[in-house]
Amino acid sequence: MEELQEERSKEKRPDDSFEGESKVLGYIQKQIVSGALKAGDKLPSERQLCEILGVSRGYVRKALSRLDHYGLIKTLPQRGTTVAELGSKAISGLIASIGSFDESFAPLDLLEIREILEGYAARKAAKLATQEDLQEILKWHMEFKAKADVGQRALDEDHLLHIAIAKASKNPVCLSLISYITPQIIALNVGFAESDPDRFVRTFEEHDRLVKCILAKDEQGAEAAMMAHMREARRRRFPD
């Protein structure tokens, strides 16, 4: 009973959602940067985070949900919630971006730089991707298709595919930069009204050409397919 009253009392605290979530994200980011938390390490429990940071459990859960959504943490049976198997710089960069949507860039500037980064990532992925990398790429490729086949938006699956390709590039700087801008790309697209009923089918076809080149270890083909995909993405968002 006392625990329930304590929990309700915490939920009434004046910290707003953005500040509460940001506090949790900032704490976890600092723990990763300092080396206190590494890939595979178990996170403090929700109760411990509440006590350490003085925020309600609702805000802790929202922050952890966002980290889970972007694949930065994993909840495993009998192990609890652990840090994902990514480099600390990549995780830190993505957490910073997730918690700082107000620090946005001009859309066209963002898309131009994205095209360069993604083209490089695709070329290197075609050369260096491991079997595990290829499995992750195929996973998100097929999950995108499952939604595209029924006409659903698949923004998350789309961007998680791109993150998987960046990870397969084996260049931590490239992965960090793509991770940093990914939430802002999502924020740019999430409110965009799609008027083309075949948009997601065509996007899948663009992805399919790209993925096939990566699987075939066709470096030039992968880069060209990614660049073509990026140009089409920009044209859909900003028609000439």
Image: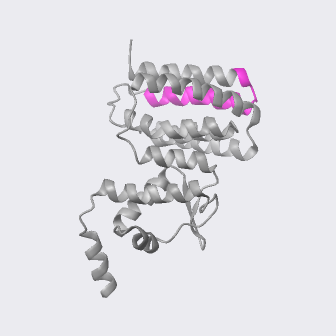
Q: Nearer the viewer, residue 42 or 133?
A: 42
Residue 143: quadrant of the picture: top right
Q: Nearer the viewer, residue 238 or 5?
A: 5
Q: Nearer the viewer, residue 116 or 165?
A: 116
Residue 80: quadrant of the picture: bottom right
Residue 24 place in picture, x, y as percent: 42, 60
Residue 139 in the magenta stretch? The answer is no
- Find the residue positioned furthest to the top: 240
Q: From the viewer's perspective, is 6 left or right of 200?
A: left
- Find the residue positioned furthest to the front: 34
The residue that appears at 58% across and 57% down in the rendered structure is 34
Q: Nearer the viewer, residue 184 or 162?
A: 184
The image shows residue 65, relative to residue 215, as above or below, that is below
**Residue 149 in sight here:** no
Which segment did they paint magenta?
199-220
The residue that appears at 63% across and 28% down in the rendered structure is 210
The residue that appears at 31% across and 81% down in the rendered structure is 4
The residue that appears at 42% across and 37% down in the rendered structure is 184
Residue 149 place in picture, x, y as percent: 48, 37
Q: From the viewer's perspective, is 217 left or right of 63?
A: right
**Residue 12 in sight here:** yes
Mostly what secondary structure, the magenta segment?
helix
Q: Quadrant of the C terminus?
A: top left
Q: From the viewer's perspective, is 174 left or right of 63?
A: right
The image shows residue 201, relative to residue 232, as above or below, that is below
Residue 45 place in picture, x, y as percent: 49, 72
Residue 16: quadrant of the picture: bottom left
The image shows residue 201, relative to residue 158, as above or below, that is above
Residue 238 place in picture, x, y as percent: 38, 19
Q: How is the image coloured?
A: one colour
- Find the residue positioned furthest to the bottom: 1
Q: Quadrant of the N terminus?
A: bottom left
